[in-house]
Amino acid sequence: MVKFEYTIKDELGIHARPAGMLAKAAKALDSEITITKDGNSVGATKLMALMGLAVKCGETITVTIEGGDENASEVAMRTFLEENL
């Protein structure tokens, strides 16, 4: 299991468009990705659940990666977050 924290920089937070992109990116990986904010965890492939976290700009999420090639999935998720959120 690999965990890392990321602070959202997008001024709108994780709203519909980036949540959809995040879910699509997570589905492409062979690991299970979980996003946690304030003790609430959701699968990164679940669009509505991601939006339900109501992550705003400046808030920190914890990304947990389990199974598959965890290291490659971590790099992919970090890259996605830096480029899009």
Image (spheres, helix red, strand yellow):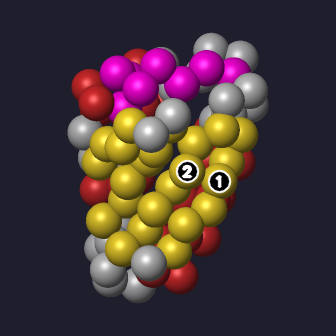
Relative to 23, does residue 64 appear above or below in the rendering?
A: below
Segment tinted magenta in the rendering: 50-57
Q: Is residue 57 visible?
A: yes
The overriding secondary structure of the stretch rendered in magenta is loop
Quadrant of the frame with the N terminus: bottom left
Label 2 element class: strand
Relative to 57, does residue 50 appear above or below in the rendering?
A: below
Q: Quadrant of residue 30?
A: bottom left
Quadrant of the frame with the C terminus: top right
- Give me the disc on residue 62: 2
Label 1 element class: strand
Q: Residue furthest front?
A: 39
Residue at image location 53% in from the left, 82% down from the top:
71
Q: Residue furthest top?
A: 12
Q: Is residue 21 visible?
A: no
Residue at image location 71% in from the left, 17% down from the top:
11
Residue type at numbered disc 1:
Glu
Residue type at numbered disc 2:
Thr
Total numbered labels placed on residues in the image: 2
The reply, left or right, for residue 43 in relation to residue 61 is left
Q: Are marks 1 and 2 in contact (CB under 8 Å)?
A: yes
Determine crowd level at label 2: few under 14, some 14-19, many 20+ residues with C-alpha closer than 10 A.
some
Determine crowd level at label 1: few under 14, some 14-19, many 20+ residues with C-alpha closer than 10 A.
some
**Residue indicated by mark 1:** 5
Residue 53 is one of the magenta-drawn residues: yes
Residue at image location 55% in from the left, 51% down from the top:
62
Q: CA distance from mark 1 to mark 2?
A: 4 Å
Instruction: Choose between 79 and 64: the one closer to the eye.
Output: 64
Instruction: Choose between 39 and 68: the one closer to the eye.
Output: 39
